[in-house]
Image (tube, grey):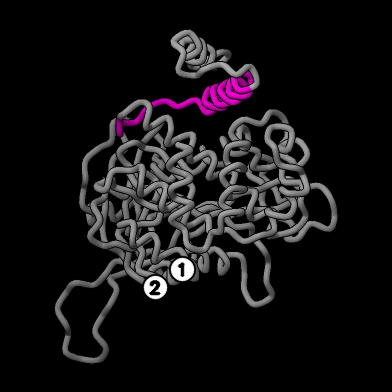
Amino acid sequence: MEQVVESVLRSMSSVKQPQAKFIASLFSVLMVFQGKANFRNLSRYCAMHEKRFSRWYRRAFDFVTFNYALLRHELPADTECIAAIDASFMRKSGKKTEGLNWFYHSQSDKAEKGLEMSLICLIDMKANTAYSLDARQTLDHEEGTRIDTYGKQVVQLAPTLRDAGVRHLAADAYYSKIKFISATCGAGLDIVGKLRCDAHLRWLYTGPYSGLGRPRRYDGKVDLHDDLARFDSQGTLEDGVAVYSKVVNVKAFKRAVKLVLLRWEVNGKVGHALLFSTDLELDAMQIIAYYKARFQIEFLFRDGKQFTGLMDCQSRNKEAIHTHINASLSALNMLKLQDRRDKKTDAPTVISIASWRRKKFNQDLMDRLFDRLELDRDCEKVTRVYAEFSNYGAIAA
């Protein structure tokens, strides 16, 4: 994987050799460090001084181009991918950090003071796994709301997503707002999302024109209980949930959507959930599959925070924070792609990032020891020891 990273960096015309050398070293150290991913601790696992981290973290680097080139190199050309967007809270101490504000923290189910990052990722539908594409710190501006900020990120990334063959963006119910949907659809993408159970839905009128006045557009409000016969039945899921679909109008969006009604009954009580897509031709089961795959972005947040130091940036500068969160997620991409390459399969598999970090740490330590001892790596005994102790302490060894 190191050779692929170096090849991608060489292909990026905006990256000069000193920065390429630093970025390659940064990715390597983020996969082997132990403890906190602050500048001083990272310097203990490489030949770079902590001040060098501080300087280069403030330099701009095109992580979108890098991640896209890396994924295009490693993933098959015919891979079906969708995009997903979500935001995650990051704890941050201190009072002078740029972007410090009150953000919703799902773990405590309330707003807390800290930082927030917005992530857009690619999801491989066949392998059922996500790869980071673009992470940005949420910064409040006077000229727009936070939903405007998320929409702007999608608009700026839309050309890259379309070039990758991505047409659909999956998002949770928070993003089901007219500003975000209008921005996304205006950029040439379609949304797959979720509606509130009490959303104001209207049937589209398909009857004849009366010949007087403005043509009738709607045929009354949708009642999810009494109007069930007007939906098209799409069968039943494995857990017994009934699936219905219909093209309806969402008053809040001021547009028609393909609505998917999920209906179930437990202990005599009927429950339902509403999924939708702005792509009116998308199959109902495909909408369910896309929305279900959206959850893979949560594993990027989890693994980044637990294993590649996503929460540990010590800098207060917004440019440095941007570099750190993207480098952390790019390092996670490399570990997942390395696992995919070693297993030689595109099917869904179980991956242990903890095991891969242990393996990378063991290999880094042995490389240093063997170099100091001037041992020939081509020696059969050394090769056997290297292979054996690479998995020492790994969970999935």
Task: Give the percent coordinates (x, y) of residue 262.
Answer: 34, 45
- Outermost residue, right direction? 95
How many numbered marks does the figure carry? 2
> Which residue is depicted at the point 78% across and 48% down?
51
Predominant SS along the magenta part:
helix
> Which residue is depicted at the point 58% across and 58% down?
61
Stretch of the chain drawn in magenta: 345-371
Q: Which residue is mark 1?
A: 155
> Which residue is depicted at the point 76% across and 60% down?
98
**Depth check: 359 or 386 in front?**
386
Task: Give the percent coordinates (x, y) of residue 264.
Answer: 35, 38
Confirm or deny contact between disc 2 and disc 1 (CB under 8 A): yes
**Depth check: 242 or 117 in front?**
117
* 360 vs 209: above or below: above
Q: Which residue is mark 2?
A: 186
- Outermost residue, left direction? 208
* 213 vs 219: above or below: below
Identify the amino acid type marked 1.
Answer: Val
Can the viewer see residue 254 in this picture?
yes
Task: Give the percent coordinates (x, y) of residue 227.
Answer: 28, 56
> Which residue is depicted at the point 28% across and 77% down?
217
Whichever of callouts 2 and 1 sits on the residue coming sooner in the sequence is 1
Can the viewer see residue 196 in this picture?
no
* 69 vs 250: above or below: above
Q: Quadrant of residue 306?
A: top right
Q: Gap in Å between the C-alphas at discs 2 and 1?
A: 8 Å
Magenta-colored stretch includes residue 322: no
Q: Secondary structure at mark 1?
A: helix
Identify the amino acid type marked 2.
Answer: Gly
**How many other residues sit within 10 Å of disc 1, few (<14), some (14-19) or many (≥20)?**
many
Task: Give the percent coordinates (x, y) of residue 301.
Answer: 57, 41
**Depth check: 316 or 253 in front?**
316
